Image: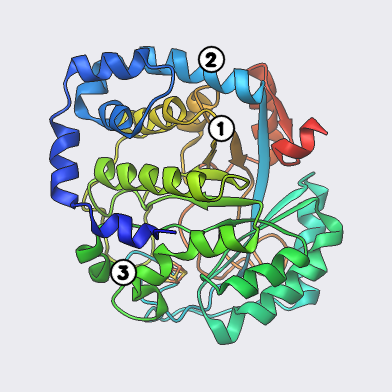
């Protein structure tokens, strides 16, 4: 099997970028008419030429999403287990060099946290850690997944990349989904943002979804950190990655997330800020490109944006999120990884979802169909 690394190395960032920016209204109209959008259509839909077509995109995106997923919204909540991190990502509050209190929750503390989370109604738990093999590595995660699984029908992780056999072992413990974001597919610039630690190894991270597919993980979440590099080009490479994985691991399900850089401790500011209209365009372009992929919108985004996008392609939302370890019950003073923009309670978010004629669901889409 040709690896995605090989595929990527045969492509050129600048050429792809130019080709996106050269798209015309005729290309966008062709993409809007297409029954099955290809990667070239996706380029047109994320291009500046598509800006006057947002209404048509919204109409089609809404119809496709309702046809495939019905009028439901999957609800999930992150549980930050640890802010220990051996990496030095320049955009993150948990970066190794930041002088903050480091916390890794014990199982007793995890129990206190999940008691609160369960009382809010959640059945899908996303475990999040920094990337510190000694503090919150494989063995720690295995013990936490084993501990929480009896309480949740779905357990996902967003943690350091691991080896295939480790993923296999976590699947045995009940792991369902792994989110691993490449942050940027701009290989030359990647090192600028990830100067040290294991995460500075671009290709090891890039190959992680392939290890996940080989290990039999049910769902793989992809994404890039919007704001680091040109979002259109990075999103095109993310979509290319998605297509590659779908061809090679066709039993696996996929999800795309849209993390936009948010204020945090430190001075880093987005080089390529993405405004609300552009983010809406991107989400709808993904739906037109891929009818089956889950599209997830976290509380990084504002209440207004989330309410407006709810019917236009998104299939999963978090609510009531705390982005610091122990934030639900144990502590309330540790540093957040990023500021939450939508601070509404799950109850209020669910009311909003129902007011729009949708039903919040607490399990995975596959579970809902059973
Ligand atoms: S983004 Fe992740 S890996 Fe990078 S510093 Fe933050 S927690 Fe660590």
Mark 3 lies on a secondary structure that is loop
- Label 3 or label 2, whichever comes before in sequence order: 2
Rendered residue at 16%/36% (across/down): 19
Q: Nearer the viewer, residue 95 or 285?
A: 285
Q: Residue furthest right?
A: 150
Instruction: Please name the residue that numbered disc 2 is placed on.
Output: 63
Which of the numbered marks, if any, corresponds to residue 90? Answer: 3
Total marks placed: 3
Determine the CA span between mark 1 and mark 3: 34 Å
Which corner quadrant of the image does residue 188 belong to? bottom left
Q: Name the residue located 26 percent from the left edge and 40 percent from the top edge.
A: 232
Looking at the rendered structure, the secondary structure element under dot 2 is: helix
Question: What residue lies at 62% left-to-right and 23% top-to-bottom?
Answer: 68
In the image, residue 233 above or below residue 91? above
Residue denoted by label 1:
292
Ligand 1's quadrant: bottom left
Residue extending farthest front: 1
- The mark lying in front, picked from 1 and 3, is 1
How packed mark 3 is, by other alpha carbons closer than 10 Å (few <14, some 14-19, many 20 or more), is: some
Residue 263's disc is none
Looking at the figure, which quarter contains the N terminus? bottom left
Inter-mark Cα distance, 3 to 2: 40 Å
- Pinpoint residue 74: horizontal percent, then vertical percent: 67, 37
What residue is at 13 percent from the left and 30 percent from the top? 22
Left or right placement of residue 70 versus residue 174 in this view: left
Q: Where residue 367 appears, x then y in whole percent?
A: 78, 39
Query: Where is residue 243 shown, x and y percent of the image?
Result: 43, 42
């Amino acid at each position: 099997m040709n690896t995605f690394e090989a595929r990527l190395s045969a492509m050129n960032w600048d050429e792809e970028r130019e080709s996106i920016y050269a798209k015309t209204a005729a290309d966008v109209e062709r993409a809007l008419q297409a029954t099955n959008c290809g990667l070239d259509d996706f380029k047109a839909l994320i291009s500046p030429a598509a800006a006057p077509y947002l209404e048509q995109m919204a109409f089609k995106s809404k119809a496709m999403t309702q046809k495939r997923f019905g009028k439901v919204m999957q609800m999930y909540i992150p549980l930050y287990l640890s802010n220990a991190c051996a990496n030095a990502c320049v955009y993150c509050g948990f970066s190794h060099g930041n002088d903050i209190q480091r916390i890794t929750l014990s199982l007793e503390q995890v129990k206190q946290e999940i008691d609160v989370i369960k009382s809010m109604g959640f059945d899908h738990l996303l475990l999040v850690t920094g990337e510190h093999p000694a503090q919150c590595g494989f063995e720690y995660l295995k013990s936490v997944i084993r501990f929480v699984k009896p309480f949740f029908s779905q357990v996902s992780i967003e943690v350091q990349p691991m080896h295939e056999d480790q993923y296999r072992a976590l699947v045995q413990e009940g792991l369902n989904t792994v989110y691993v974001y490449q942050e940027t597919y701009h290989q030359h610039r990647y090192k600028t943002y990830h100067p040290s630690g294991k995460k500075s190894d671009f290709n090891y991270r890039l190959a992680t979804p392939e290890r996940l597919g080989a290990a039999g993980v049910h769902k793989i979440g992809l994404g890039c950190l919007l704001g680091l590099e040109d979002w259109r080009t990075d999103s095109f490479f993310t979509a290319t990655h998605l297509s590659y994985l779908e061809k090679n691991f066709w039993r696996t399900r996929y999800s795309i997330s849209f993390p936009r850089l948010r204020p945090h401790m430190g001075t880093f500011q987005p080089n390529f800020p993405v405004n609300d209209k552009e983010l809406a365009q991107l989400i709808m372009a993904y739906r037109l490109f891929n009818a089956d992929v889950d599209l997830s919108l976290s509380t990084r985004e504002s209440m207004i944006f989330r309410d407006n996008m709810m019917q236009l392609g998104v299939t999963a939302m978090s609510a009531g999120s705390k982005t610091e370890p122990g934030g639900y019950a144990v502590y309330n003073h540790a540093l957040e990884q990023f500021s939450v923009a939508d601070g509404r309670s799950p109850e209020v978010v669910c009311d909003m979802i129902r007011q729009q004629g949708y039903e919040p669901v607490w399990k995975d889409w596959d579970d809902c169909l059973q």
